[in-house]
Each structure stands twice: as structure tokens, then as C-alpha cells.
Amino acid sequence: MKKTFVALAAIFLASAQLFAQPVITKADKDRAAELVSKMTLEEKCLLIAGQVDGFHTAAIERLGIPSVRMADGPQGVRNKTKSTYYPCGISLAATFNREAALGVGTGIGYDARARGVGIMLCPGVNIYRTALCGRNFEYYGEDPYLASETAVQYITGIQKQGVMSTIKHFALNNEEYDRHRVSSSADERTINEIYFPTFRKAVEKAHVAAVMTSYNLVNGVHAAEDPWLIKQNLRKWGHEGIVMSDWTSTYTLMGCVKNGLDLEMPKARVFRYADIKALMDNGVIEKRDIDDMCKHILQSFIAYGFLDKPMQDTSIPEDYEVSRQLAYNASVEGPVLLKNEGILPIKASKKNNIIILGPNANRVPYGGGSGRMQPIDGRAISLFQGMSNLGKGWNVNLMDWKNVNVDSLRKASAVIFAAGFSSKSEGENFDRKYTLPSNQDSAIAAVAVLNPNIIVVANSGGEFDINPWKDSVKAIILAWYSGQEGGTALADIISGKVSPSGRLPFTFWGKLENNPAYAAYHSLTPDISKKSKSLDPYPYVQYSEGIFLGYRGVEHFGVTPMYPFGYGLTYTSFAYSDLKVSPAGEGFDVTFTITNTGKVEASEVAQVYVAPVNPKVIRPAHELKGYEKVKIAAGKKGNSANVTIHLDRDAFARYCSKSHKWVVDAGEYKIQVGSSASDILLEETVTVAAR
């Protein structure tokens, strides 16, 4: 069944790529301009602010302009509907698989079309600074290259189905604590090298239809009113689509109108007709200011055909088998095996007597806020259900983790503790704690005393403290929020039907204070749910780690992480050999061989890092600039794969704050190939000319 699942999904992915990616043309602009010339000021003011239920734009019926429905969010279509629940963003990044990201985007596109949703408010791509951010689970980790590659595929999948994608939150929204007031303070180079690349690539490569601004301020200016963000960067990258506010993230009328915002959501708080008219009558706001906003909205709608055809495709069922298949494909590749002392995989056996317990044992957890999903009835499979569905050779029992049967635990052949967070402890509009909620640490430790054959499966949007029980358990699987198919996918991994292939998309420091960004993270009050009591109207958060975020700071700050970026175990072993780096165009082709030296078919994530030798300015020791996930069979036949990864000129570039440009310094660079940021296995030095 699983082979059919994957094969059918692959067919649909191939067919999905036959559809053209909508882009705004001159004809679209001309048509939009003509419509705007016919609109009254009152109609224009209706168009530039959300209407109806806060998830629709206004219809201008006399001009044939429809109301366009929007919906959250990154894990599927929500807002007054039930839909396919896909794995969360951090899980998708952990797949290190572009096809998986394309598949989730494609599935969301199908689901949106089936429901008449024209604009999806996703993906979220804010960079992971520390484990405390409540929305890390929605995002793509700490590395801008990995996040960019994931986002481009996800956006492409959605938009090729004729649905607009909205990338968010622009920019530097890296915590939820006091998010309307916090000012993220970073230098120009840090912003361009770490926090801009995913947004920029989404514009330049995926032609993302809309960009949502963030709640926070950037260097003292609210993002929705920041001309440097919107006009001097976003628009200059080539974005001709919509710039919309996050919900209630507008603060002044003049700031939004003059500095580049097009659409205020969920309704008119500052874009009120009476206020705009008064300022226009006084010559403070010009007619062209409002006209440009309307043009950006309408030319986007026109490019996507919203004025010419129904947004709903009734031929696509709301409960779509292909969407479920695509969700499974991503779910099974995201979980990261952090530790395995020979207990995994568990094989089918008459002797199996497996106990599953813990807060997430028989529920499908999710993060809170706009990423929270309502899966279609009967479609969400818990870990207990997934294990129970394995069939013959499996005896699986569910136990109340707060009222355990000691004798049963001692006799169990294996114990799976389903730990982690949920929407109550991790989500939007609040930052989370570093420790597991509800006394789970003590419960895991107590179970480990009774039965050493314990496997911890943890749902989380990022790193958390595993020190209280890490050395007492046999295996740890970081399962993220793996969606409606997560229980099935995890059962397939635990049983060995599939080897785990997820990799950490962030550095797992082991202690919160080991992260170089820790001291510069604002949310350090004992009760993180409370707002700041600072007398400063805008508390400033200094991004003092600069460009040395995550694994980039390991060598720079001299801190060794518990698990490095890109790390993840499988059920086999791999060997790397035959590195060759050859000039190709303006860059290089990096070619090497990976051999499966074990007895199990598995996927390896090959990672290519670029390390400047004697750089002219201070730079990270190395940076991820390429990766490829390769499935390799075991055995003598077909147990090797030749991999080629192309590095273009951008792979060697840095941002120059003096010239305000990206530059490539002449000199030597090491091309490093490895299985994580700390496990470099092959290396060759090349010489690069200046640009």
C-alpha cells in the first residue's frame, strides 16, 4: 500500500508541474490600471482593507471584481473548514527534501482550490534564533539556504494550482513575546545574510504572490510602515504583488500609505474612508498613493484569473486521496532520530508486548494559533493508532501515563513514551518554555527506572531540555508536529518499514544558555506569558550574535552543541568518497560518491558547505550552500550513488554594508562535503575570482 501511496503522489507531482506558474504581465498591469481609473475613492478604500469575516477582500461588483477568500496556514487550509493536516514547517525543513516541500505545497493548493480559497497565508519562514519562539514549529529552521530552498518549492507547489501564496512575516519576527512592541535590532549585513534571503529568493525564484509584514518593529520602525523594508528592498527585488499587514499590525495611516503597504487585514483600522478622504482633501495623501495600492492588489488577482473564472474547483474533492498521500510522504521523512542504542527498529514478533503512554500517545498534537489545524474527521492517526495498525506480530497497549501499572511496565518488551508540547504550551502570541510541560521529565525518568527499553517520541517545534532523562533512555525521536499521517509514518519508522531520514534544521545546543543568541533574546522573564514592564515604549532586542547564528557560531564562539545542524541517525551507515570539484559556468560542480555500507535501504542527506580560507572580512567558518537527499539500497548491487551538486557564484558571496551589495572576494575556498555541519568527510580547495 505504501508503495502505491508514494507512486501515485509522484505522478500527481509530475502532472502538477505542467501548470504554468502565474506571473504578473504588462497586460495584467494595464487591465488593473484601467479598473482603478473607474473606481471611486470609496471603492478603493474598500479594496485595500479586509472585509466580511476578516478573511475576505471586498467585492466591487459593478466592475466585476470578486471577493477573494483567504485562509491560514502553513500546515493546511483552515478557517471555517476541515482539511488535510500536513506536517509543520520545521518538520518539512527537516526532510531536507525539495520534492517533499513541493508536494506539501501542491497538496495545499489542491485543498485550497477545492474550497474556493484564492489566497493562502503561508509559508512562515522566520529564522529560528532560539528554542523559545512560540512559532518555531511553523518555520524552516536556522539556516537561510535551507529555508529558502524549502520555501521556493512549497510556494511553487501552491501557486501552480492557481492559488496565491503569502510569505510571512517580513521581517525579523523571531519571537512571539510582546510582539507588537518588540523592536528587532540588527545590522545591515546580518539582516541581508541571515534574515532576508528566504524572502528574496521567494520573490526572485518563486514569484511569490503576496508578502505579509510582521508585528514587530525593525530597528525602531514598525514593519508594516517601514519604507526600507518594503520600498528599498522588497520592491527592488522585483516584487510586484501584494504587501499585506498581519492581522491588526497597522499603527498609523500615513506610515502605511506612504511606505508601501497595500492591504490592511483583517479590516480597516487605519485605512478608513473618512480619514483617507480628509487627508486627500488636504493634499497630504496623493491620489496615486491609493491607486498604486489598488493596482498591486488587482494585477495580482488578474494574474491568477480571479476576475475571469471561479476560484473553486469542484472537480477536486475536499477529502482528496492525493493530498493524504503527499502528507504521508512528508511526514515519514521529517522525524529525526537523535539517539538509538540498538533498540530500533523493533521487528514484528509474537513476543512483542509494547506499552505506549504519555500525553501525546493517543492524540495528534499541533502547535497553537494560526497554524492550528482541524483535520477531516477520521483522518488523523495518533501514534498509538499507527502502531496498532501494524497488524500481525504487534501487541500494543495504551497506558495512562499519570496512573501507571508498574508490573505491566516492567514486563513490557519496549515502552514508547509520547512526550512533547501541544497548542497549549507552544504556539502563536506567546513564547514557550525550554522544559517539557506537565511533569513529563519526572514521568520519563520514573518509567526508565522500571524498564530500560524506553523510546521517547517527542512532539516539538524545536529544541527542548532532554538532560533530565537523555542518558536513561534507549532512543529519542524528534517527531515535530507530523500531521494527520504522523502516527502511520512514525509506526513505519519504529517498525523498520522505513529508515528515519530527517535531519536537524537547527543546532541542538543541549542547554538554552549555550546558544549564543540566548543573552540577546528578550523573553527571559520568569513568566513568559506576561508582557514587558519596561518604561521604554519599544523594548529593543539586540541581535548581538550577528551573522554567527546557529551553527555559524559554533567555531566563532567556541561552543560545542549536543547535536549539530544537519544531524540525524538512520538504520544503516554510509561512506563518502571520490570528491571532484570542477568549474561549471560561473561556479562549480561538486561530485562525489555515497555508499550504503549497512544492511538496510535508507536515505542519506549529503550537505555541501563553503568555507573561505583567509577571508578579507570576518565570516563564518563555513556555510551550507547545497544539499541532496539520496535513497540508496543495501547490498552489493546498487549500494552506491553518484551525487552532483552545483554551486553558483552566490555560494561564495557575502554582503558588503559599505557598498550595500553582495560581493564575491577573490581567494581560496574549501568545498566541504559531510553528513552534518560538524561531520565533514570530504574537502577540496578551489580558487575563486572576484566579482
Image (cartoon, grey):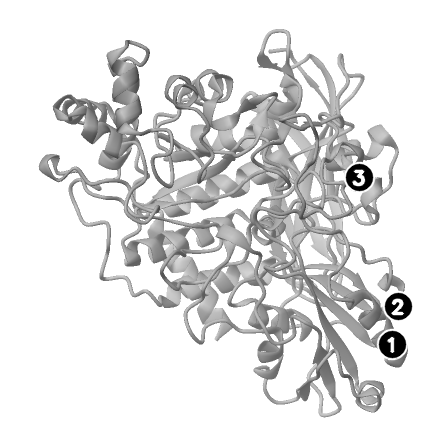
Residue 100 appearing in the image: no
Q: Quadrant of residue 496?
A: bottom right
Q: Amino acid at mark 3?
A: Asn
Crowd class of label 3 (few under 14; some 14 to 19; many from 20; radius 10 Å): many
Residue 606 in view of the camera: yes
Above or below: residue 345 compared with residue 622: below
Q: Earlier in the sequence, mark 1 or mark 2?
A: 1
Query: At numbered mark 3, what does the secondary structure look like: helix, strand or loop?
Result: loop
- Residue labelled with disc 2: 472
The C terminus lies in quadrant: top right
Name the N-terminal-most of marks 1 and 3. Answer: 1
Residue at label 3? 515
**Which residue corresponds to the image point at 64% horizontal and 43% vertical from the top-left?**
141
**What residue is pinned by disc 1?**
452
For the point 35% across and 25% down, the residue is 240
**What's the residue type where badge 2 is placed?**
Ser
Query: Which of these two is toward me, 516 or 479?
Result: 516
